Amino acid sequence: MALKRFSVLDLLGLNLKEHDSLDLRCICGRRGLVRDITIPDLNRPGLALSGFYDSFAYQRVQLFGRGEVAYLNKIIAEGRTETIQQLFSYQLPCCIFTHSLEPPQAFIDMAEETGCPVLQTGLESSEFSSRLLRIMSNIFAPKISIHGVLVEVYGLGILILGDSGVGKSETALELIERGHRLVADDVVEISCVNGNVLIGQGANKIIGHHMEIRGLGIINITQLYGVGSIRERKEVQIVAKLEEWDANKVYDRLGTEALTMEILGVQVPKLEIPVKPGRNVPIILETAAMNERLKSMGYFSAKEFNQNVLKWIETDSARAPYYSVDDSY
């Protein structure tokens, strides 16, 4: 359950793109706009309006579609407003009417009396539900800030980690020069959406898409390379940890060991890349991205190589150099 502080007024004030627009406006109950939305979910109060309030999810946003409005008009016409009064006895975050439907006047009066905000949208119920749930899942998603660089390479999000001065920004700059895109530099804010998807973006919008290069200073990637070299957010699919070359450390040379890193409870494939003069780290990351795409298509180069070697060992041509003609068993 999410516990992020997010009010109805914040919901109305969201600056969303056209395909995510909620088209919300307040009809009444403006003094209740400060009420908090604590659960990123919706509730259709059809059962509650019929008088069944057991396990009523009053903490959620209450959504009224054509069916609920038709039933409201019916019970108000029959003078049965007790269930509506009971509805407003709960501390509802807000009520939202879809299809630009107008709530009955009796409903508006009770909402004003209790200070419950009533909103209206021109969207259909299903479309509004999907948009609102998608937006709130992002808002209420658990977040963490990580020191690193997030880039998009061949469509895959690669989070570059490492100690300060190891060359993270310089590696990202070379990748941008090769036509790939920068998401965030220095501080990456990662949120876990739907429990299994990690979305990374810049933690600070003011310094977004700027990079600090030692000896050069702050550079604006958008101005230097154009808007095609950046993007606002990207799923984190690979973690590449850069580290100083250690001659005493045994590095993976086959690629059969599947290393992972846990971020917000999600396991992400991890690469440990030793850095030393002469190693072209950007091209290693490009190859890693393409190799990861092959893995997602079911082709694992290291495993196939290992299987081919084992098959070759079992053949006569592999055993022949080790046995003379006179050896018999």
Image: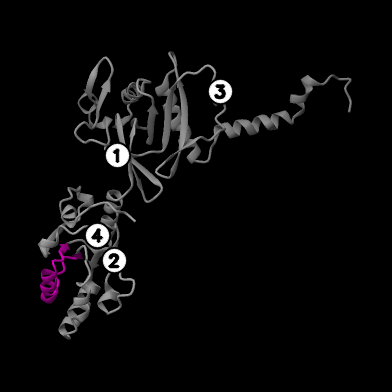
Q: Which class describes the residues within 10 Å of circle 4: few (<14), some (14-19), or many (20+)?
A: many
In space, the residues marked 2 and 4 are separated at their CA atoms by: 13 Å
Mark 3 element type: loop
Mark 2 and mark 1 lie on one chain; the one further toward the N terminus is 2
Whether residue 98 appears in this view of the structure is no
- 103 w.r.t. 289: above or below: below
Q: Which class describes the residues within 10 Å of circle 3: few (<14), some (14-19), or many (20+)?
A: few
Q: Residue furthest bottom?
A: 78
Residue at numbered disc 3: 250
Mark 4 element type: helix
Label annotation for residue 290: none
Whether residue 21 appears in this view of the structure is yes
In space, the residues marked 4 and 3 are separated at their CA atoms by: 54 Å
Mark 3 and mark 2 lie on one chain; the one further toward the N terminus is 2
In space, the residues marked 2 and 1 are separated at their CA atoms by: 30 Å
Q: Nearer the viewer, mark 3 or mark 2?
A: 3
Mark 1 element type: strand
In space, the residues marked 3 and 2 are separated at their CA atoms by: 56 Å
Estimate the x, y position of residue 276 in percent, counting from the top left.
44, 16
Residue 265 picture quarter: top left
Residue at numbered disc 2: 43
In space, the residues marked 1 and 4 are separated at their CA atoms by: 23 Å
- 192 w.r.t. 128: above or below: above
Residue at numbered disc 4: 128
Q: Is residue 287 magenta?
A: no
Quadrant housing the C terminus = top right
Residue type, numbered disc 2: Asn
Q: Which residues are magenta?
A: 95-121
Mark 1 and mark 4 lie on one chain; the one further toward the N terminus is 4
Name the residue at 27% across, 60% down.
129
